[in-house]
């Protein structure tokens, strides 16, 4: 069983992403957080075993960069795939500064993009 945490404030995107991930691979345990701060608390309090973190950039309570800075500060290193609607080159460039970010995917989520996410689990 592979453990994925999905942090995105858009419940529709989460539903689509979850369904497509589980369609592509049935051995996934997917936990979701609509609020980045709650996802961060989960990491800091529980030290969960996570194979992959799917993270949106722009969220109302805590953006991806602040979230990742907190993980780094607390010596938590896990593979991260950014899933975002941001096509801003500054965001793309900024993502390259974080060693833990292994992919930057622009929404909408398609089967082809899901395949690239799944490939990171093998």
Image (cartoon, rainbow, N blue to C red):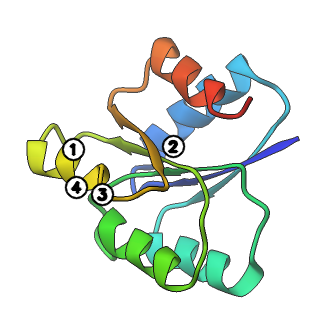
Q: Mark 4 packing: few (<14 Cα in 10 Å), some, or many (20+)?
A: few
Identify the disc placed on residue 97: 3
Of residues 39 and 14, the one drawn nearer to the viewer in this rendering:
39
Label 1 neighbourhood size at 10 Å, few (<14), some (14-19), many (20+)?
Answer: some
Q: How far is mark 2 from mark 3, CA to CA?
A: 26 Å
For marks 1 and 4, give the CA distance: 5 Å
Identify whether 51 is placed above or below 59. Answer: above
Alpha-carbon distance for marks 1 and 2?
A: 21 Å
Q: Is residue 78 visible?
A: yes
Q: Residues under labels 2 and 4: Cα distance?
A: 24 Å
Residue under label 1, please give it. Answer: 92
Residue at 62% over, 36% down = 18
Q: Are marks 1 and 4 in contact (CB under 8 Å)?
A: yes
> Badge 3 local density, few (<14 within 10 Å), some, or many (20+)?
few
Q: Determine the residue positioned at 39% across, 50% down.
A: 10
Residue 56 percent location from the top left of the image: 38, 52
Q: Nearer the viewer, mark 3 or mark 1?
A: 3
Marks 3/1: CA distance? 9 Å
In the displayed orientation, state which residue is furthest to the top: 112
Residue 17 in the figure: left or right of residue 103:
right
User: From the viewer's perspective, is the residue at label 1 or at label 2 nearer?
Assistant: 1
Q: Residue at x 61, y 73 (%)?
A: 76
In the displayed structure, does residue 105 sit left or right of residue 24?
Answer: left
40 above or below 77?
Answer: below
Q: Is residue 92 left or right of residue 44?
A: left
User: Nearer the observer, disc 3 or disc 4?
Assistant: 3
Disc 2: which residue:
14
Q: Dot 3: what SS?
A: loop
Tell me: 121 left or right of 38.
Answer: right
Query: Which label sits on residue 94?
Result: 4
> As displayed, is residue 81 above or below residue 40?
above
């Amino acid at each position: 069983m592979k453990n994925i945490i999905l942090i995105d404030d858009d419940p529709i995107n989460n539903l689509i992403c979850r369904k497509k991930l589980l369609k592509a691979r049935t051995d996934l345990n997917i936990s979701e957080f609509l609020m980045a701060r709650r996802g961060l608390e989960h990491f800091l309090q529980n030290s969960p075993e996570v194979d992959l973190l799917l993270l949106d950039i722009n969220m109302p309570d805590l953006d991806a960069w602040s979230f990742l800075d907190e993980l780094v500060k607390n010596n938590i290193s896990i593979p991260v795939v950014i899933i975002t609607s941001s096509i801003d080159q500054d965001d793309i460039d900024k993502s390259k500064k974080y060693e833990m970010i292994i992919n930057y995917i622009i929404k909408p989520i398609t089967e082809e993009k899901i395949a690239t996410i799944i490939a990171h689990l093998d």
